[in-house]
Amino acid sequence: QVQLVESGGGLVQAGGSLTLSCAASGPTSSRYVMGWFRQAPGSEREFVVAISWSGGTRVYADSVKGRCTISRANAKNTMYLRMNSLKPEDTAVYYCAAALDLGGSWSLQGKYDYWGQGTQVTVSS
């Protein structure tokens, strides 16, 4: 069982930046695809971004494209999400997820095998 723990959330003003981290532990020798999802109050959880094991493929939601950068350090079993030019609509709980085989369905929540508990990001206007 892989455990995922997010960190780095907080309160930031619009236009500011944050870097979220996701640390994986447990049987992490498998080549997991990893991703970020978010859930705003009163909304369904939505896909943000995902990255392949090698880091060679990154898929971004249109809502964050150009403002966010995903990366990973496999030697540290850690994934990062750098968010710039934050907007109030980015306010949400951000969840880290891992999947063994997405079958190309990067944004489908049901394809992810493991989830973290989430970290709150609040962007004030």
Image (spheres, rainbow, N blue to C red):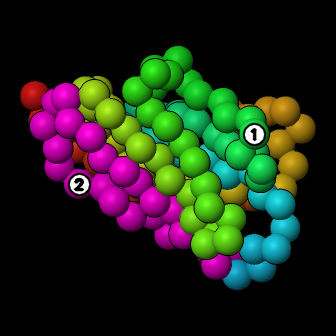
The part of the image, by quadrant, that contains residue 49 is top right
Q: Is residue 87 left or right of residue 26?
A: left
Residue 119 at x, y percent in the picture = 37, 58
Give the residue pinned by disc 2.
Answer: 10
User: Secondary structure under badge 2?
Assistant: strand
Answer yes or no: is residue 7 visible. Answer: yes
Rendered position, 97 above or below 74: above
Residue 77 at x, y percent in the picture = 64, 70
Q: Residues within 10 Å of mark 2 (few under 14, many from 20)?
A: some
Indicate which disc, 1 or 2, sits on the residue closer to the N terminus: 2
Rendered position, 110 above or below 118: above
- Frontmost of labels 1 and 2 is 1
Give the residue pinned by disc 1.
Answer: 56
Residue at image position (37%, 51%) is 19
Q: Is residue 2 left or right of residue 91?
A: right
Residue 104 at x, y percent in the picture = 84, 33
Residue 72 at x, y percent in the picture = 61, 55
Q: Is residue 118 left or right of residue 89?
A: right
Mark 2 is on which residue type?
A: Gly
Residues 93 and 67: in front is 67
Span colored in magenta: 1-25
